[in-house]
Amino acid sequence: MPHDHHDPDYDEMTARTRALETLLVEKGLIDPAAVDAIIETYSEKVGPKNGAAVVARAWTDPAFAGRLRENATAAIAELGFTGRQGEHMQAVFNEPGLHNMVVCTLCSCYPWPVLGLPPTWYKSPPYRARVVREPRAVLAEFGVALPAETEVRVWDSTAELRYLVIPERPAGTEGLDAEALAALVTRDAMIGTGLAVTP
Amino acid sequence: MNGPQDLGGRMGFGPVAPEADEPLFHAEWEARVLGITLCCGALGHWTLDESRHARESLPWTDYLSFSYYRIWLTALIALLERHGEITAEELAGAAPRPGLRPERRLPAERVPQVLASGGPTDREGAAEPRFDIGAQVRARNLQPPGHIRMPGYVRGCVGRVEARHGAHVFPDTNAHGGGEQPQHLYTVVFEGRALWGPDGDPALTVSADLWESYLEPA
């Protein structure tokens, strides 16, 4: 995958994208300010900090954790996180002996309201192909080693359900408030390719 | 369809390559493609399922070699041409005709509300679900040429119904102008060895969300 802005493919894509946007604006079909507003939303407002707030609340508020298990869409909406690619949410809880991971083998389904847009690796063929078959090898590439007896549960997002992994709360965090706890929750921990950070 | 999108269990792609401090977009045009695609979806010519099918219908060599947002852009152009909103000649520089649905144009001020409300796919009024929680089911060996949301790696395998989610829009019809035709949706759990054979990880389970017509009693 080319990541260099000077890659010729990207220059070609810039030209193609501009050509299409210009045509659609001329035809009255899109508002360039709406395109800007969408980009701004996912660049600045919606991202993994939302999900980290959900996790921290679940760690500190057992009643919320219960509602999150029962109806994740409604519980997450209590924190104001709703919408596109999060219409039907399910929270899956890690526990001793059980580790959850999320993938979309068919495309790029991902819980936008709580995690933002997915990283490139999540959408890439290696992750989508391998995680349903050899999740421990994939985890090793993320630097995560699990005991062999730990069950790995992989959730393939083949419908409109979107999954949020609730990682285990790290030991030694009893004195931390929700804000400090949220800082320990990485995006990868909420996909299942990482664990919450131990302070 | 057994297209290039159906990647679960395929071999030969090499390691996952997480990128430290990955930017949200790797080039400005990627961000524009995201925004343009969502704006064009608001015109209402096609469903989310039809747009997924447009992406999976790319030739394998394109799908597997294009960057993610190039796949999106290529499929978007195909959808706009299919529904008569643009022509190849216009894209090449011919004088543009007026758009078909300018009244559906998404204005900037409506973006927050549209993104925050999304498009739920659950539907009322379906018949009773055929399978109980805990039921053993087999994923049917369906090989349709059109869109399907059952990954190839579960076909023919036996799993257990773990959850029922009520009726949801059926993508196989909704992708092809056949309407929503909602049917019951289930989370089905498969043992790793049921999917990958005796060499499969004995402590692995994989679940997929599968519509009722994908399943049969086992």
Image: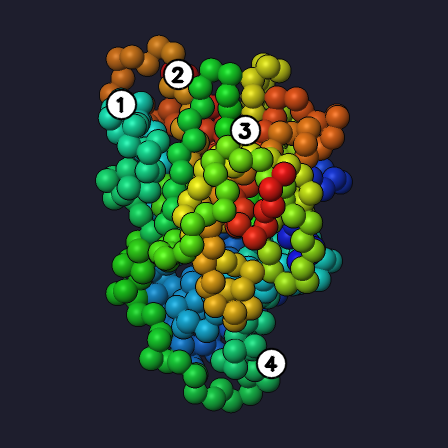
**Rendered image quadrant of residue B98:** bottom left
Note whether B75 is above or below A3 in the view shown: below
Q: Amino acid at mark 3?
A: Arg
Which residue is the site of mark 1?
Answer: A62
Mark closer to the observer (4, 2): 2
Real-space Cα distance between discs 2 and 3? 20 Å
Q: Earlier in the sequence, mark 1 or mark 2?
A: 1
Are dots 4 and 1 on a single chain? no
- Which chain is mark 4 on? B
Which residue is the site of mark 3?
Answer: A153
- Which chain is mark 1 on? A
Note whether A18 is above or below A198 in the view shown: below
Real-space Cα distance between discs 1 and 2? 16 Å
Mark closer to the observer (4, 3): 3
Which residue is the site of mark 4?
Answer: B88
**Rendered image quadrant of residue A179:** top left
Real-space Cα distance between discs 4 and 2? 56 Å
Instruction: Give the quadrant of the C terminus of chain B.
Output: top right
Real-space Cα distance between discs 4 and 3? 46 Å
Q: Residue at x 69, y 55 (%)?
A: B143
B12 vs A133, nearest the viewer = A133
B26 vs A138, nearest the viewer = A138
Q: Could you classify mark 3 by the number of other residues whose Cα lies within 10 Å: few (under 14), some (14-19), or many (20 or more)?
A: many
Mark closer to the observer (4, 1): 1
Q: Amino acid at mark 1?
A: Pro
Are dots 4 and 2 on a single chain? no
Q: Position of residue A81 (x, y in %)?
A: 30, 44
Instruction: Give the quadrant of the N terminus of chain B.
Output: bottom right
